[in-house]
Amino acid sequence: MLRRMSEIRALTFDVFGTVVDWRSSVIRHCEAFGREHRLAADWGAFVDDWRYDGYMGGIGRVIRGEAPFTTADNLHRAKLGALAAAAGWKGVSEIDLDALNHAWHLLDPWPDAVAGLERLRSRFVVSTLSNGNLSLLVDMARHAGLHWDAVLSADVTGAFKPDPLCYQAGARFLGLQPDQVMMVAAHKGDLKAAQKAGLKAAFVPRPLEAGPNRDVDLSPDPAFQYMASDFHALADQLGCP
Protein backbone atom coordinates (compact mmCIF):
# COMPACT_ATOMS: atom_id res chain seq x y z
CA MET A 1 0.00 0.00 0.00
CA LEU A 2 1.37 3.40 -0.99
CA ARG A 3 2.13 5.57 2.01
CA ARG A 4 0.95 9.16 1.75
CA MET A 5 3.83 11.60 1.48
CA SER A 6 1.88 14.82 0.94
CA GLU A 7 3.89 16.51 3.70
CA ILE A 8 7.14 16.07 1.75
CA ARG A 9 7.77 19.01 -0.53
CA ALA A 10 11.37 18.47 -1.63
CA LEU A 11 13.93 15.73 -2.13
CA THR A 12 17.58 16.57 -1.54
CA PHE A 13 20.17 14.28 -3.03
CA ASP A 14 23.63 13.19 -2.12
CA VAL A 15 25.43 13.27 -5.46
CA PHE A 16 28.77 11.40 -5.33
CA GLY A 17 27.85 7.73 -5.41
CA THR A 18 24.08 8.22 -5.21
CA VAL A 19 23.47 10.07 -8.48
CA VAL A 20 26.78 9.61 -10.28
CA ASP A 21 29.28 6.78 -10.54
CA TRP A 22 32.33 8.69 -9.35
CA ARG A 23 34.73 5.77 -9.10
CA SER A 24 34.42 4.32 -12.60
CA SER A 25 34.31 7.81 -14.12
CA VAL A 26 37.49 9.02 -12.44
CA ILE A 27 39.32 5.76 -13.12
CA ARG A 28 38.63 6.24 -16.85
CA HIS A 29 40.02 9.77 -16.71
CA CYS A 30 43.10 8.56 -14.84
CA GLU A 31 43.70 5.77 -17.34
CA ALA A 32 43.58 8.27 -20.20
CA PHE A 33 45.90 10.60 -18.27
CA GLY A 34 48.30 7.72 -17.68
CA ARG A 35 48.41 6.84 -21.38
CA GLU A 36 48.99 10.48 -22.30
CA HIS A 37 51.83 10.93 -19.81
CA ARG A 38 53.20 7.38 -19.90
CA LEU A 39 52.38 6.68 -16.27
CA ALA A 40 51.59 3.27 -14.84
CA ALA A 41 49.56 2.77 -11.68
CA ASP A 42 46.85 0.71 -10.07
CA TRP A 43 44.32 3.36 -10.97
CA GLY A 44 41.53 1.83 -8.90
CA ALA A 45 43.64 2.00 -5.74
CA PHE A 46 44.87 5.45 -6.75
CA VAL A 47 41.33 6.80 -7.08
CA ASP A 48 40.24 5.17 -3.81
CA ASP A 49 43.10 6.88 -1.97
CA TRP A 50 42.38 10.15 -3.74
CA ARG A 51 38.74 10.06 -2.71
CA TYR A 52 38.66 8.45 0.70
CA ASP A 53 41.80 9.94 2.23
CA GLY A 54 41.98 13.21 0.34
CA TYR A 55 38.34 14.23 0.10
CA MET A 56 36.57 12.41 2.89
CA GLY A 57 39.55 12.62 5.21
CA GLY A 58 39.81 16.32 4.47
CA ILE A 59 36.13 16.86 5.27
CA GLY A 60 36.64 15.07 8.57
CA ARG A 61 39.50 17.41 9.46
CA VAL A 62 37.36 20.45 8.67
CA ILE A 63 34.45 19.17 10.77
CA ARG A 64 36.77 18.42 13.70
CA GLY A 65 38.16 21.95 13.51
CA GLU A 66 41.63 20.75 12.50
CA ALA A 67 41.57 22.62 9.17
CA PRO A 68 39.74 25.68 7.80
CA PHE A 69 36.70 25.29 5.59
CA THR A 70 37.57 24.81 1.93
CA THR A 71 36.03 23.34 -1.18
CA ALA A 72 35.89 19.79 -2.51
CA ASP A 73 37.97 20.95 -5.48
CA ASN A 74 40.70 22.15 -3.15
CA LEU A 75 40.64 18.95 -1.11
CA HIS A 76 40.90 16.82 -4.25
CA ARG A 77 43.66 19.01 -5.70
CA ALA A 78 45.76 18.93 -2.54
CA LYS A 79 45.59 15.14 -2.36
CA LEU A 80 46.34 14.78 -6.06
CA GLY A 81 49.49 16.85 -5.63
CA ALA A 82 50.56 14.65 -2.75
CA LEU A 83 49.88 11.47 -4.71
CA ALA A 84 51.82 12.73 -7.73
CA ALA A 85 54.78 13.69 -5.54
CA ALA A 86 54.77 10.34 -3.74
CA ALA A 87 54.69 8.47 -7.05
CA GLY A 88 57.52 10.59 -8.48
CA TRP A 89 55.64 11.54 -11.62
CA LYS A 90 58.00 13.12 -14.15
CA GLY A 91 57.01 15.55 -16.86
CA VAL A 92 53.65 16.32 -15.27
CA SER A 93 53.04 20.02 -14.72
CA GLU A 94 50.78 21.76 -12.24
CA ILE A 95 48.53 22.64 -15.19
CA ASP A 96 48.35 18.94 -16.06
CA LEU A 97 47.33 18.13 -12.49
CA ASP A 98 44.70 20.88 -12.56
CA ALA A 99 43.25 19.29 -15.70
CA LEU A 100 43.15 15.85 -14.09
CA ASN A 101 41.52 17.28 -10.98
CA HIS A 102 38.72 18.54 -13.24
CA ALA A 103 37.73 14.89 -13.78
CA TRP A 104 35.55 15.25 -10.66
CA HIS A 105 33.41 17.75 -12.61
CA LEU A 106 32.74 15.19 -15.37
CA LEU A 107 31.21 12.20 -13.63
CA ASP A 108 28.74 9.95 -15.40
CA PRO A 109 25.29 9.25 -13.95
CA TRP A 110 24.05 5.85 -12.91
CA PRO A 111 21.84 4.37 -15.67
CA ASP A 112 18.58 5.19 -13.85
CA ALA A 113 19.59 8.61 -12.58
CA VAL A 114 18.55 11.02 -15.34
CA ALA A 115 15.15 9.55 -16.17
CA GLY A 116 14.42 8.60 -12.57
CA LEU A 117 15.23 12.09 -11.39
CA GLU A 118 12.84 13.54 -13.97
CA ARG A 119 10.06 11.33 -12.64
CA LEU A 120 10.73 12.45 -9.07
CA ARG A 121 10.90 16.06 -10.21
CA SER A 122 7.36 15.80 -11.60
CA ARG A 123 6.04 15.73 -8.05
CA PHE A 124 8.77 17.14 -5.80
CA VAL A 125 11.33 19.91 -5.82
CA VAL A 126 14.64 18.15 -6.41
CA SER A 127 17.95 19.59 -5.25
CA THR A 128 21.47 18.52 -4.61
CA LEU A 129 22.66 18.60 -1.01
CA SER A 130 26.27 17.71 -1.57
CA ASN A 131 29.69 18.25 -0.10
CA GLY A 132 30.81 19.16 -3.60
CA ASN A 133 31.26 22.83 -4.41
CA LEU A 134 28.83 24.80 -6.54
CA SER A 135 30.93 25.08 -9.69
CA LEU A 136 31.71 21.36 -9.58
CA LEU A 137 28.03 20.42 -9.24
CA VAL A 138 26.95 22.76 -12.04
CA ASP A 139 29.57 21.33 -14.40
CA MET A 140 28.57 17.81 -13.42
CA ALA A 141 24.88 18.50 -14.01
CA ARG A 142 25.60 19.85 -17.48
CA HIS A 143 27.88 16.92 -18.31
CA ALA A 144 25.50 14.25 -17.02
CA GLY A 145 22.21 15.83 -18.16
CA LEU A 146 20.88 16.20 -14.61
CA HIS A 147 18.04 18.70 -14.23
CA TRP A 148 17.98 20.13 -10.72
CA ASP A 149 15.56 22.69 -9.38
CA ALA A 150 18.30 23.92 -7.04
CA VAL A 151 21.98 23.23 -6.54
CA LEU A 152 22.94 23.28 -2.88
CA SER A 153 26.56 22.65 -2.01
CA ALA A 154 28.81 22.86 1.02
CA ASP A 155 30.12 26.26 -0.03
CA VAL A 156 26.49 27.48 -0.26
CA THR A 157 25.28 26.01 3.05
CA GLY A 158 28.54 26.86 4.79
CA ALA A 159 29.01 23.37 6.24
CA PHE A 160 29.93 19.86 5.20
CA LYS A 161 27.67 16.91 5.84
CA PRO A 162 27.22 15.30 8.35
CA ASP A 163 27.19 18.62 10.22
CA PRO A 164 23.50 19.25 11.00
CA LEU A 165 23.94 22.84 9.87
CA CYS A 166 24.27 21.61 6.28
CA TYR A 167 20.93 19.78 6.30
CA GLN A 168 19.12 22.56 8.13
CA ALA A 169 20.50 25.21 5.79
CA GLY A 170 19.42 23.13 2.81
CA ALA A 171 15.82 23.10 4.03
CA ARG A 172 15.98 26.80 4.82
CA PHE A 173 17.25 27.71 1.35
CA LEU A 174 14.29 25.79 -0.10
CA GLY A 175 11.90 27.73 2.13
CA LEU A 176 10.84 24.59 3.97
CA GLN A 177 10.93 23.06 7.42
CA PRO A 178 13.34 20.14 7.80
CA ASP A 179 10.49 17.61 8.11
CA GLN A 180 9.20 18.73 4.69
CA VAL A 181 12.43 17.54 3.09
CA MET A 182 13.60 13.99 2.41
CA MET A 183 17.28 13.21 1.94
CA VAL A 184 18.02 10.62 -0.76
CA ALA A 185 21.38 8.91 -0.44
CA ALA A 186 23.31 5.69 -0.93
CA HIS A 187 25.12 6.19 2.38
CA LYS A 188 23.57 5.30 5.71
CA GLY A 189 25.67 7.76 7.67
CA ASP A 190 24.42 10.63 5.52
CA LEU A 191 20.81 9.58 6.03
CA LYS A 192 21.13 9.10 9.78
CA ALA A 193 22.69 12.54 10.12
CA ALA A 194 19.87 14.00 8.01
CA GLN A 195 17.27 12.39 10.25
CA LYS A 196 18.96 13.79 13.35
CA ALA A 197 18.65 17.22 11.73
CA GLY A 198 14.92 16.67 11.22
CA LEU A 199 14.78 15.46 7.61
CA LYS A 200 13.26 12.22 6.37
CA ALA A 201 15.39 9.61 4.64
CA ALA A 202 15.28 7.44 1.51
CA PHE A 203 18.02 4.83 1.11
CA VAL A 204 19.02 4.01 -2.49
CA PRO A 205 22.01 1.65 -2.21
CA ARG A 206 24.53 1.58 -5.05
CA PRO A 207 26.31 -1.78 -4.79
CA LEU A 208 28.90 -0.91 -7.45
CA GLU A 209 29.91 2.47 -6.03
CA ALA A 210 32.82 1.57 -3.76
CA GLY A 211 34.48 -1.02 -5.98
CA PRO A 212 36.03 -4.30 -4.80
CA ASN A 213 38.32 -2.93 -2.11
CA ARG A 214 35.82 -1.65 0.45
CA ASP A 215 33.00 -3.28 2.38
CA VAL A 216 29.80 -1.24 2.42
CA ASP A 217 26.68 -1.96 4.47
CA LEU A 218 23.83 -2.25 1.95
CA SER A 219 21.36 -4.01 4.23
CA PRO A 220 17.86 -2.59 4.79
CA ASP A 221 17.39 -0.29 7.76
CA PRO A 222 13.88 0.15 9.16
CA ALA A 223 14.86 3.54 10.55
CA PHE A 224 14.65 5.02 7.05
CA GLN A 225 11.26 5.99 5.67
CA TYR A 226 12.00 4.47 2.28
CA MET A 227 14.41 2.06 0.62
CA ALA A 228 14.52 1.61 -3.16
CA SER A 229 16.78 -0.20 -5.59
CA ASP A 230 17.06 2.85 -7.85
CA PHE A 231 15.39 6.18 -8.60
CA HIS A 232 12.63 4.57 -10.67
CA ALA A 233 11.72 2.29 -7.79
CA LEU A 234 11.70 5.29 -5.46
CA ALA A 235 9.46 7.19 -7.90
CA ASP A 236 7.06 4.22 -7.97
CA GLN A 237 6.89 4.17 -4.17
CA LEU A 238 6.26 7.93 -4.04
CA GLY A 239 3.49 7.79 -6.65
CA CYS A 240 5.33 9.71 -9.35
CA PRO A 241 4.12 9.32 -12.95
Image (tube, rainbow, N blue to C red):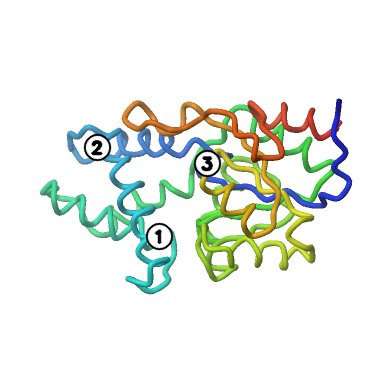
Q: Indicate the position of residue 176 as horizontal and vertical percent values.
A: 79, 63
Q: In whole angstroms, how far apart are the C-alphas of marks 3 and 1?
A: 16 Å
Q: Secondary structure at mark 2?
A: helix
**Amino acid bearing label 2:** Gly
Q: Badge 3 local density, few (<14 within 10 Å), some, or many (20+)?
A: many
Residue, disc 3: 187
Find residue 38 and report its image quarter: top left
Locate the N terminus by quadrant.
top right
**Amino acid bearing label 3:** His
Q: Indicate the position of residue 157 as horizontal and vertical percent values.
A: 59, 68
Q: In whole angstroms, how far apart are the C-alphas of marks 2 and 1?
A: 28 Å
**Amino acid bearing label 1:** Ile
**Contact, mark 3 vs mark 2 (Cβ under 8 Å):** no
- Mark earlier in primary sequence (2, 1): 2
Q: Please tell me which residue is depicted at 59% across the width and 42% down the height of the picture.
A: 185
Q: Indicate the position of residue 207 as horizontal and vertical percent values.
A: 49, 27
- 235 left or right of 54 in image: right
- Mark earlier in primary sequence (3, 1): 1
Q: Please tell me which residue is depicted at 53% across the width and 60% down the height of the picture.
A: 135
Q: Secondary structure at mark 1?
A: helix
Tell me the mark number nearer the camera, choosing from 2 and 1.
Answer: 1
Residue, disc 2: 34
Q: Badge 1 local density, few (<14 within 10 Å), some, or many (20+)?
A: many
Residue, disc 1: 59
Locate the C terminus by quadrant.
top right
Q: Badge 2 local density, few (<14 within 10 Å), some, or many (20+)?
A: some
- 50 left or right of 105 in image: left
Q: In whole angstroms, how far apart are the C-alphas of marks 3 and 2?
A: 31 Å
